[in-house]
Amino acid sequence: MSFRTKMIAGIALIQALFLFAILMSSLAVLARSRDQALKIRAVSDARLFATAAANALVSEDMGALQRLVRQVVRNRGVVYAAAWDGDGRLLAQAGAGAGRPHTFRAVTSVAVDGTSYGKVEVLLRHRGFGRVLAAARRRIVAIALGELLLVGLVSWLFGRYLMRRIGAIEAGTARIARGEFGFQLPTEGDDELARMIAGFNAMSVQLQALQDEAARRHHEVLTLNERLEERVHERTEALAVANRELEYLAMHDPLTGLPNRILLQDRLLQAIRAASRQPASFALMIMDLDGFKDVNDSMGHEAGDRLLQETAKRLTGQLRQSDTAVRLGGDEFAILLPTVARDIDAGAIARKLLRALEEPMVLGDQTVRVTASVGAVLFPAHGDDVSTLLRRADRAMYEAKRERHGFLVFAPVMEEEGDDRVRLQADLEHAIRHGELVLHYQPKVDLVTGKTSGAEALVRWNHPTLGMLPPARFVPLAERTRLIEPLSLYVLRTAAVQARAWADAGRPLPIAVNISAINLGDGEFVGHVERILTDAGVSPDLIELEVTETALMRDPECAEAVIRALSNLGVRVSIDDFGTGYSSMAYLRKLTVARIKIDKSFVMDMGVNRNDGVIVRSIIDLGHSLGLKVVGEGVETADAMAVLASLGCDYAQGYHLARPMDAEAFDAWRQANP
Ligand code: C2E
Ligand code: CA
Ligand code: CA
């Protein structure tokens, strides 16, 4: 049943019930007043009858009494009349009617001068009044029904009027539900419905405004997204370009455009593999200019640079396509000759190169004549791995320079040690066994939180006669002999004990230990590390190992395997002096290292040399793109630290924060700088 029908039916029913009730109650009032009138008449008729009957009763004239009774009954409405004597005996009666509805009985005693002679009774009834009442009731029902109809009709019309306007609101609601906003419903009048429609219209406008706003926002977000994507794309491109540049830079010497040490190592490795398969020989030469320092000092760096560029040009001018000329650094060059198999052929080429250099070079307004020293090795006669070949070619070059030979091929005698070295070596052996080596610790600080995040252990030799020796004085010596192994293990053991002590004291701090390339090549090294950690009872995450990038590149495959084994132990590995070893991005990706440490030379010169700033930034980006944390070393000033922080570098280490110090001093420093 619709709302309208319900409303109409309700109103009509209430109306009809009310009307019915009112009419019926007036009918009841009417009937009651009629009865009342009848009662009064009955009493007065009885009184008249008593007066008239008095003579007949006194005289005991029964005939007159009977006539009188019959006469009374003939009166309108009287249905029964009777007379009794003083003893209650019925003397005369006429009519009938006792027990009928709507009859009224009146009894009056007949007294004369205070003496009662009997009593008379009259019964009155209004005849036909029941019929009148029934007719009135029927009419009332008819009127009520008519009323019902009329009210129904009026309500229906009124409902139609109401529903037309409510229907408009209903349709509007449906449109809103469909998501149509902003339309207006027609308003008429000023009643509640009109106000409701006005409110509805306001809501529709408001919704439209909200929808427009949402659409605008959505559009904005889309545009922003697009712009962001563009930017990401640009950045990615820029990063790719930077990476290519970095890789080129990593492989080439910017001054001469020649390949650098890393590319040489790569080519050497390839040459070794190719020659091993054939089998065949090849030659490697290292050349060092004589007196280059003098040119630099007397004529300036620019002249020095021009000399190096000219040298590079002349060298490549003398070589074949398959040969590689490399600038190793400073005034040192290397030449890889894949097709040269004999000493004499190498010698012939070396002399050709030296002659080409001796042609006068014009630098500004001066002319110089360049001489150089060349050392050569042959594969496989003088070595069958990259580092041995390079080291021995270098050795031969030094001998050539020392003996002013111009050119020398390596000979085993060149590697025999001098007397001094033998003595220092014996001392070092003794020092390791007798605890003359001490560790100093330098803090590493988190650039975001400012907290100390670790320490680097740096070894010193407390020499009985020479005093405190820096690592540069004895680590290279240890590396040339087998002593680097006990040295590294000694340092590692000491650091592990220290790490345990700090942890036990409730202030654990990871300690980084430097290891050398030779340790990486030692098949037992990882086992040693594991045992040392177990013996000291120290958790592997409290010891970190630092390997220089150059050490990694000596034998990249082996280094990769050792680093993987170490990280399986839970020991983290960092790449030290990053930026000097020319590793490639592809290679770095393979390593499971935790962080890279930017070589301190770049950080220290960042303020003065723009190129160094660029390199620092590139290394940080490169490290982050590989998911590695980056440490800036050699932070000597607050400025350098601020620049590193602004470039997003993660940790800093350097004299600005603290110099390396013994464990006790370090403890005190840490207490002051938590
Ligand atoms: P490294 O691993 O690069 O260590 C950092 C060197 O930079 C330390 O020199 C440290 O004193 C120095 N340094 C730190 N902050 C600054 C700074 O702000 N400015 C400057 N100019 N220098 C700073 P240290 O102690 O003389 O060590 C030199 C190198 O010796 C080390 O370089 C590391 O390669 C090697 N080394 C040190 N201890 C060990 C060791 O136990 N085992 C091995 N194999 N090598 C070690
Ligand atoms: Ca280091
Ligand atoms: Ca370093």
Image (cartoon, grey):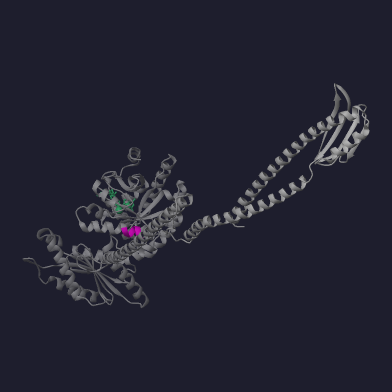
Residue placed most toward the observer, 85 or 330: 85
Residue span colored magenta: 621-625
Q: Is residue 113 above or below residue 554?
A: above
Residue placed most toward the observer, 400 or 557: 557
Write the residue at 69% across / 51% down. 139
**In the rendered image, which quarter contains the N terminus?**
bottom right
**Whole-percent x, y for residue 89 in the image:** 94, 30
Spot the residue most to the left. Answer: 365
Q: Is residue 39 above or below residue 483?
A: above
* Quarter holding residue 121: top right
Determine the main secondary structure of the stretch shown in magenta: helix
**Whole-percent x, y for residue 338 in the image:** 28, 75
Residue placed most toward the observer, 640 or 155: 155
**Whole-percent x, y for residue 388 in the image:** 31, 65
In the figure, is residue 477 to the left or right of 501? left
Spot the residue most to the top. Answer: 114
Q: How many marks?
A: 0
Residue placed most toward the observer, 23 or 389: 23
* Residue 623 among magenta residues: yes
* Quarter holding residue 385: bottom left
| Observer able to see residue 343 | yes
In the figure, is residue 472 to the left or right of 214? left
Write the residue at 44% across / 41% down. 504
* Residue 247 among magenta residues: no
| Observer able to see residue 637 | no
**Whole-percent x, y for residue 189 in the image:** 45, 52
**In the rendered image, which quarter contains the C terminus?**
top left
